[in-house]
Amino acid sequence: MTLKKEKESIRKSIYDKLFKEGQSLRPNGDYGKIPDFKGKDIAAELLASTDEWKQSETIFCSPDSAQIPVRYLALKEKKNLLMASPNLEHGYLYLEVNQLNGKEEEASTKEGAFKHCSRFFDFGGDESFEIAIDMLVEGSVGVDRIGNRIGKGKGFADREIEDLFNKNLIDENTPLVTTIHPFQLVEHVPMEEHDRKLNMIVSTDEVIRICRD
């Protein structure tokens, strides 16, 4: 089996299990998408209880539906939020919490983030962000206990992480996190050379910290 087919098999297994066990919030399942799982708010609250979260002032987060509670808690707890735009078509959206005026819940959605963002930043290039990212949170389809991750197969998370490394906005000490349903935790995820490992996984019932190489 090729690496591509192995990854597709893992994705399908996870999509099938979430759908058949009634753990997807989408009526037709999550096929081809980052799973929008039941309990995503519980996973977000568990993440928010960690020291890594409490010490963070600015959170980077993917625009996935599963991470809406993460974005909401960040804004509710007066943290600034940098969100990738869907498919990176508009780069990154920066939301300054002191400008939201009680609109944190609306701003945590994709549509609300566009409405309330105070600034756009380009993906790629040499533009200076003039901010520091204290934690990065990505959506995932599947992960294993040593931090290997697969997304939906488009490579956006890997490109985001690489770009932020290149801009010196994150480094090897930055928590690289995903929030997941326990069904998304698998025995092994095959990795390619360009794939980035996570160093922290938060499900609905546990926090997994991976030693950085």
Image (cartoon, rainbow, N blue to C red):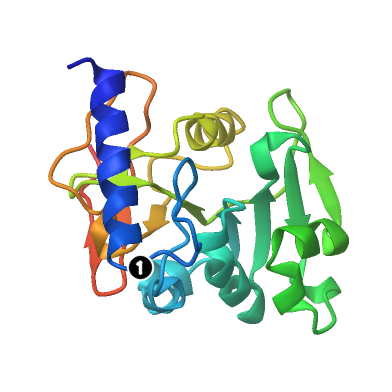
Number of other residues with Cα within 10 Å of mark 1, as a class: few under 14, some 14 to 19, many 20 or more = some
Indicate the quadrant where residue 179 lies. Answer: bottom left
Residue picked out by circle 1: 23
The total number of labels drawn is 1
Residue 108 horizontal side relative to residue 2, left or right: right
Residue 128 horizontal side relative to residue 148, left or right: right
Q: Quadrant of the N terminus?
A: top left
Residue 38 horizontal side relative to residue 7, left or right: right
Q: Please state the horizontal and vertical placement of residue 132, each as a whole percent of the image.
A: 62, 51
Is residue 50 shown above or below 202? below
Q: Please state the horizontal and vertical placement of residue 171, each as a whole percent of the image.
A: 46, 40
Indicate the quadrant where residue 127 lies. Answer: top right
Front-most of residues 96 and 112: 112
Amino acid type, residue under disc 1 in the picture: Gln
Q: Please state the horizontal and vertical placement of residue 202, each as a whole percent of the image.
A: 32, 64
Is residue 112 shown above or below 77? above
